[in-house]
Amino acid sequence: MPNLDSYFPHGKTKPCELRLLSVKKEYRGGKIFLQIALQLMQYVLKQDCDIALISGTTKQEKLYKHIGFVPFAHLVGDEKAKFQPMFITHETIALKI
């Protein structure tokens, strides 16, 4: 995505991307994904990153927002699968835990 950093909150300059996180069907619907995602975000943001990025499926956008992800830019993907670029920071995580 051109000019990716132009979408980041002021002062955020060290991004990392999280990819391919999923939960088996039989374990979905509870708080497992939320806990995994929060722990993963905390770990990543303790590294040398100050903003974590995902391309979240539009089918789960409400869940990602609940965790603290913030949508930015336009949808990506194709007709079969649309994804919303999203970010999370220490500040947005702190609001959720």
Image (tube, helix red, strand yellow):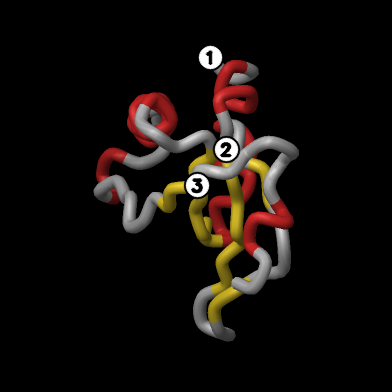
Q: Secondary structure at mark 3?
A: strand
Q: Residue at x 52, y 56 (%)?
A: 56
Q: Nearer the viewer, mark 2 or mark 3?
A: 3
Is 75 rendered above or below residue 44? below
For label 1, the residue is: 97
For label 2, the residue is: 88
Considering the image in quadrants, where does the N terminus appear? bottom right
Query: Which of the marked residues, 1 or 3, is nearer the chain's N terminus?
Result: 3
Q: Nearer the viewer, mark 1 or mark 2?
A: 2
Q: Secondary structure at mark 1?
A: loop
Q: Is residue 57 left or right of residue 3?
A: left
Q: Residue at x 43, y 48 (%)?
A: 16
Q: Amino acid at mark 3?
A: Pro
* C-beta proximity under 8 Å, tags 1 and 2: no
Q: Quadrant of residue 27?
A: top left
Q: Residue at x 58, y 17 (%)?
A: 94
Residue 8 x/y as whole percent = 68, 47
Query: Which of the marked residues, 1 or 2, is nearer the chain's N terminus?
Result: 2
Q: CA distance from mark 2 to mark 3?
A: 10 Å
* C-beta proximity under 8 Å, tags 2 and 3: no
Q: Quadrant of residue 38?
A: top left
Query: Which of the marked residues, 2 or 3, is nearer the chain's N terminus?
Result: 3
For label 3, the residue is: 15
Q: Nearer the viewer, mark 1 or mark 3?
A: 3
Q: Nearer the viewer, residue 1 or 13?
A: 13
Q: Secondary structure at mark 2?
A: strand
Q: Amino acid at mark 2?
A: Ile
Q: Nearer the viewer, residue 60 or 76?
A: 76
